[in-house]
Amino acid sequence: MRKSEPKILNPALVKVTRGDREFNNIEAIELYSASAAEYWRIRFKDGSERTYSFAELEVVHSCRRDAIIENCLEYLRQIASINGLKSDDDGSLLQKQYEKLDFVGTDTAMAVYLNPENYKAHVVSVNSFIFPFGGKRRFVSYIILGVFCGVFE
């Protein structure tokens, strides 16, 4: 039986979760395909290695490998550098936030915003409203109070 050559993934472009635990400090990821299954061999920076069935992992890829998105992010970084909002050390606060942005999941609104041709918004049907400030009764109370105080005209 011939062993298949692994496909190598860049760990900076993948977020891997198993159950409720996101894996951090990944050094290398190798994908192996067997007859009907795919296995991921993950080596961590502490030297340990583990093999997982792909079925037990939740994987989100970064869209940062997309040239159009990288171009948009570079443009946004340049625009942010001239923003007047400054940090304590007199640098551009917004530019620093863009510099920290090293992962943009393909399942995020930002991916859709940066390249709507390749990434589509997921439509979720909701059977009832979500009230962020407590239950429906509290929400209605806020509305009534707002009308009474003249907030809503």
Image (cartoon, rainbow, N blue to C red):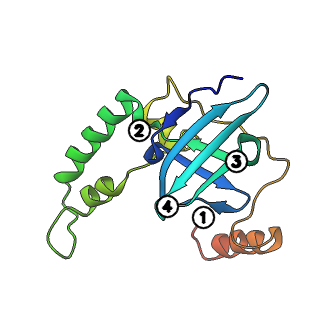
**Residue 71, image x and y in percent?**
30, 32
The residue wearing badge 1 is 152
Residue at 55% of width from left, 60% of height from top? 48
What amino acid is at disc 3?
A: Tyr
Asked if residue 98 is positioned above or below residue 91 in the image, the reply reads above
Q: Which callout, 4 or 3, points at the residue further toward the start of the chain? A: 4
Q: Which residue is mark 2?
A: 64
Between the residue at mark 2 and the residue at mark 4, the CA separation in whole angstroms equals 27 Å
Look at label 2 and name its amino acid.
Answer: Arg
Q: Earlier in the sequence, mark 3 or mark 1?
A: 3
Secondary structure beneath label 4: loop
C-alpha span from label 2 to label 1: 43 Å
The earlier-in-sequence mark between 2 and 1 is: 2
Query: Are discs 2 and 4 less than 8 Å apart at CB?
Result: no
Q: Quadrant of the N terminus?
A: top right
Q: Which residue position is annotated with label 3?
A: 52
- Comparing 64 with 38, the one in front is 38
Q: Please state which of residues 108 and 103 is positioned toward the viewer in this rendering.
A: 103
Residue visible at 61% across and 45% down in the picture: 41
Whole-angstrom CA distance, mark 3 to mark 1, is: 56 Å
Q: Are marks 4 and 3 in contact (CB under 8 Å)?
A: no
Amino acid carrying label 1: it is Phe
